[in-house]
Image (spheres, rainbow, N blue to C red):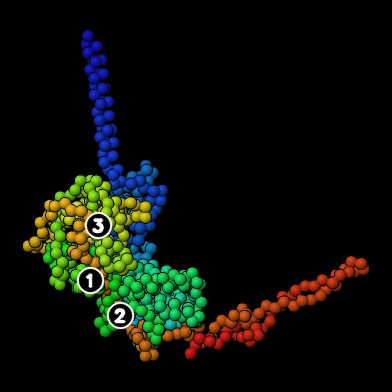
Amino acid sequence: MGHKLFTLTKILCIASLIYTVLSFMNLNETLATEKSIIKKEASKHFLRDLERLAKKEISAKDAVKLYEEIDGVYEFSSLQKKEYEKKLKYWKQYAAKDYVRNGKKWIPRNDYIKSQKEADKLINQALELVKVDNWKFAEKKFKSASKLDQNAIRSDFTLGLYYSPLIFTDIKKASKHFRTVLKRDPNNISALNNLALTEMRLGNHTSALKQWRQAVAISPKIPEVTHNLGKLISEASIKTVYIKPSVLEKYTTLYSDAIVSGQGTKADLKKGWLYLPLVLPKKEEERVAVIDDKISKLIALGSGSGFVTAPNYILTNRHVVKDKKNGPFDVIKIINPEDPKHQRELNANIVAISKNHYLAILRCDQLKAPAIPLSRSLPRRGSDIMILGYPLGDDLGRKVKSSRGSITALPIEDPKSYAFNKLLYDATSNPGNSGGPVCDNKGNIIAVHSIGTPRLEARVDKYAGGIPSTMALPFVKKSIPNIQIPSEFNKEMDWPDVDEKISPSTVMIFSYTKNSSLGFIPTSKRKGNNFYEENLCLSCNGTKKRKCYNCKKGRMTTFVQSQEVVGSGNLRRIVKRNLRTKSRCNVCNGSSRLRCKHCR
């Protein structure tokens, strides 16, 4: 009897254990199903791309943050998981030692600060040598400074202008230094324009087009860029320079689109080629304090969207008003939504920037647009939503655009997660939509649009996301004392009515920076031109001579026909041969250069 009871008890325990295991498996399967709504499978090269991005960060702490952002967002295979943990451990060790990047090398922060100070000292010495026209030794110090601080751009930008037609006209070296600037600061608008000018003079018109196209995408409002485009098209039409018809057509389209949009400045053919002055990253600018008010000008660096959340206050994304690398922009302007031509700009000030939720608040006292309410709760998954904003900036015009979709995932409050904290939806969005309102069918704001999903593999993502209003509301209340947020709307509307209600309060935002001083005035100032204008002939780069079209290095190849008797007797025959000979060119008389017919 006791034996049977023990066996029965054993069977019940085993059954209970099996039930517990199955229940746990079902629970895990349920959790996995819930997370799969927003998780996506990591591609084969996902970790390679992640590591490449991490190596571009300035500090090891930023690299760790990048790795932690995607934790829980992507599904990894077992091998990928091991590799991910290995790389994260590696970066955490660097972060614990406070390592920062100097070019491609990672060194302790204190060592990097010493290198920066030494580089700044060399630059100051070089500038003093420039003022006494001792360019030979100044050049050596600029190059040494560039090697010491491989994140800074001041030395290479100065050398780019030094070798440009503004001063000494060594185009290949000028192009090399401007490319170095772009490796260190990829969206530097001045380096893009100046590199395009040097590539144009080298005859690399496809490369020049690429640089100018990127510059126009960043800001079509810079007059020097569109002026240079228009001037090049004019030079091609009078055959001063040859450009392939397919490439010339792309130049023409880029120029005409910028002019028709109302943002580009028409080319003044009486002027020369216009270079842009130095624009430093904010951290470098603050360190060396080289803003020159005498030649200071505002250069537009980007655009975004925002909406009025309280009288005179605008809620937008952090990156619209603050660059991750360079800090807050110098000047923020918004397009007055009451202006029927969408041209009038109003000055705005940064009131607050959130560290946690990717938000920022602006104030504009001249703005009269009505405030729209932030929702205190979120709709259910599957609910329809509408995004409003200004995608692609001036490329699509300055009128507000809207797109619709439905909510695909609700946020999960997790301070370490980049995507789980977002409200995800499948509405179409583009760069420029950032900071715009995401609203429900009552006209209440349920999110501030911020992402096209995580930074990696954005090209294949079909989701967009925004900071939920429930997270934005505490930040707004904390940042603006005694704020009066309007009450929520309760009446459901047709979507065209929602669009009509929200559009007047959706604004376009432009971010500007100031140019910095080189520490000297380019020699073109003494020629009577503007600071950064040069008029060298595009055909010969100012040498007044062109390469001879008829020869190679003064020698030309000619063929002389000779006759030779081959064989004997009945097999004897005459064979004609073409003998290749080299002779002095009869066009250039052996000099390999011709007088430029385009020079005045």
- Distance CA(mark 2)–CA(mark 3): 41 Å
**Visible in this render: residue 101?**
yes
Q: Earlier in the sequence, mark 1 or mark 2?
A: 1
User: Viewer-proximal residue, 466 or 402?
Assistant: 402
**Residue at point 27%, 56% (across, down):** 403
Q: Position of residue 520 (x, y in %)?
A: 33, 84
**Visible in this render: residue 179?**
no
Instruction: Identify the amino acid type marked 2.
Output: Ser
Disc 1 element: loop
Q: Point out the frontmost of discs 2 and 3.
A: 3
Disc 2 element: loop
Could you say which disc has been placed on residue 340 in the image? 1
**Residue at point 39%, 90% (across, down):** 527
Q: Are marks 1 and 2 in contact (CB under 8 Å)?
A: no
Give the quadrant of the N terminus: top left
Q: Which residue is mark 2?
A: 517
User: Viewer-proximal residue, 423 or 585?
Assistant: 423
Q: Position of residue 379 (x, y in %)?
A: 19, 48
- Distance CA(mark 3)–CA(mark 1): 22 Å
Instruction: Identify the amino acid type marked 1.
Output: Pro
Q: Residues within 10 Å of mark 3 (few under 14, many from 20)?
A: many
Could you say which disc has been placed on residue 175 in the image? none
Residue 339 location, quadrant: bottom left
**Residue at point 14%, 58% (across, down):** 373
Q: Which residue is mark 3?
A: 387
Q: Residues within 10 Å of mark 1 (few under 14, many from 20)?
A: few
- Distance CA(mark 1)–CA(mark 2): 38 Å
